[in-house]
Image: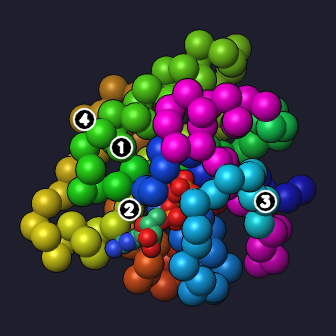
Amino acid sequence: MRHIVALLGVGGVGKTTLAYRSMGLSLRPRVTLRPGVYKLYLDRGVNIIDVPGQYVFEVIHNFVRMATFFVDKVLYVYDVTQQDTLYAIAEMHSRLLDRFVKPFKRIAVAGNKMDLAREIGLFIEADEIAAAMGVSELHYISALQDEPSELVKILF
Ligand SMILES: Nc1nc2c(ncn2[C@@H]2O[C@H](COP(=O)(O)OP(=O)(O)OP(=O)(O)O)[C@@H](O)[C@H]2O)c(=O)[nH]1
Ligand SMILES: [Mg+2]
């Protein structure tokens, strides 16, 4: 069975960059307007679902319209230099819980753009919000700079 992971987060946090770099591509993505499904062939197949939308309501609307019942893991992505993107994933999560009887098997939070955080000296941690969301799996990454092998790990 393929492992299906959905990337959720507001516009510009780096979802498509994460999907591309996990596949070893270094293209600079444009704004995602349509749902993307990227297939990775590792020891186990992975489908990465890149959900379009700039704002919370759009992302949730687009995600719910997709075949969300197949999703094995939801990876909430925020930008560690933008506090509002962190609040946005908490809001997305509560909106999803309002709609689904059962939460997803696996839920994780990824704080992205760590390279930028180090450069500008501003790092917004997700510990408290992740705990409030009931999420214990938390990763801090640079979708732009981390090795693909490291990025792939957080998809599982
Ligand atoms: N410095 C830095 N920039 C990043 C990183 N990841 C993504 N970016 C940049 O952030 C911008 C948005 O990245 P995308 O991957 O398009 O973000 P997205 O979440 O797919 O955005 P939408 O498609 O608009 O929803 C691009 O200019 C990326 O190059 C990162 O780890 N570090
Ligand atoms: Mg995108």
* Circle 3 residue: 37
State the residue at coordinates (40%, 35%): 88
The yes-or-no answer for disc 4 within 8 Å of ligand 1 is no
Q: Position of residue 116 (x, y in %)?
A: 25, 72
For badge 3, the amino acid type reads Val
Residue count near mark 2 (Cα–Cα under 10 Å), binned few <14, some 14–19, many ≥20: many
Q: Quadrant of residue 20?
A: bottom right
Answer few, some or many: residues within 10 Å of disc 3's Cα (few below 14, many 20 plus, some between 14 and 19).
some
Specify which label sits upstream in the sequence, 2 or 4: 2
| Segment tinted magenta in the rendering | 39-65
* Rendered image: mark on residue 128: 4
Task: Tell me, yes or no, whether the two marked residues, 2 and 4, touch with CB atoms within 8 Å.
Answer: no
Q: CA distance from mark 3 to mark 2?
A: 20 Å
Q: CA distance from mark 1 to mark 3?
A: 23 Å
Q: Is residue 24 visible?
A: yes
Ligand 1 within 8 angstroms of badge 2 C-beta: yes
The amino acid beneath tag 4 is Glu
Disc nearer the start of the sequence (1/2): 1
Mark 2 sits on what residue?
A: 112
